[in-house]
Image: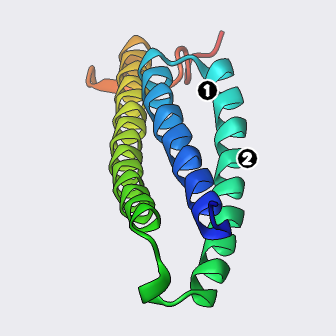
Amino acid sequence: MTSHLYSALSQQVANLEGLCSLLEKELHLISSRDAETLMSLLEDKSALLESIQATDQKVEALHRQTTDETISAEEQGLMDKAKSLLEDCKYKTKINQKAVEQGQLRLTHLRNLMLEVRAKESLTYDKKGKPNAGRLGSGISA
């Protein structure tokens, strides 16, 4: 007969395995810049995180009802596996965060390059012949 704690821990391990899988897909989508699929994945991820939180509260309540002596080896094994999966998820989340940050830095760099090109295209000269980055034709009257 399986205990309620064992069932809750099994569910939590399954949830965390699902989260690890979603985090791997998320990194791929971040790298490939597939925004639509990424938004759909983020909705799934949000729902899974809510499920993990609810299951965590259930596990905590069930764990408080038992003593350390009554926890079976199988339950302890599931707790250890859940902790390991949680650490793996945290690591993958940090990687995904870095990937997003790098993507934002590349976009900022590209935007700056485009602004520089635009500024060079609008470069004019003042009355003394010195370069003046301003609007074309300013100061000219017909």
Question: Is residue 127 at all visible to an observer of this figure?
Answer: no
Q: Is residue 17 left or right of residue 106?
A: right
- Colour logic: rainbow
How far across and down, in percent of the image, does residue 120 sit? 35, 17
Instruction: Identify the element where label 2 is drawn.
Output: helix
Count up the numbered dots: 2
Q: Which is nearer the eye, 128 or 6?
A: 6
Seen at 59% across and 47% down, the residue is 15
Snapshot quadrant of residue 112:
top left
Give the crowd class for mark 2: few <14, some 14-19, many >=20 residues within 10 Å: few
Whichever of labels 2 and 1 marks the residue nearer the N terminus, that label is 1
Quick check: 31 left or right of 1?
left
**Viewer-proximal residue among 120 and 129:** 120
- Residue type, mark 1 in image: Leu
Report x, y in % for residue 119. 41, 22
Q: Kindly identify which residue carries mark 1.
A: 38
* Quadrant housing residue 108: top left
Residue at image position (43%, 37%) is 100
Q: Is residue 42 positioned above or below 51 on the image?
A: above
Q: Which mark is residue 135?
A: none
- Asked if the residue under mark 1 is in contact with the one under mark 2, i.e. CB atoms within 8 Å, the reply is no
Q: Is residue 57 left or right of residue 30?
A: right
| Residue nearer the viewer, 83 or 98 | 83
Q: Which residue is mark 2?
A: 47
Residue at 42% x, 87% y is 69
The alpha-carbon separation of the residues under discs 2 and 1 comes to: 14 Å
Asked if residue 61 shows in the view, the reply is yes
Indicate the quadrant containing the C terminus: top left, top right, bottom left or bottom right: top right
Circle 1: element type: helix
Residue 1 to residue 101: above or below: below
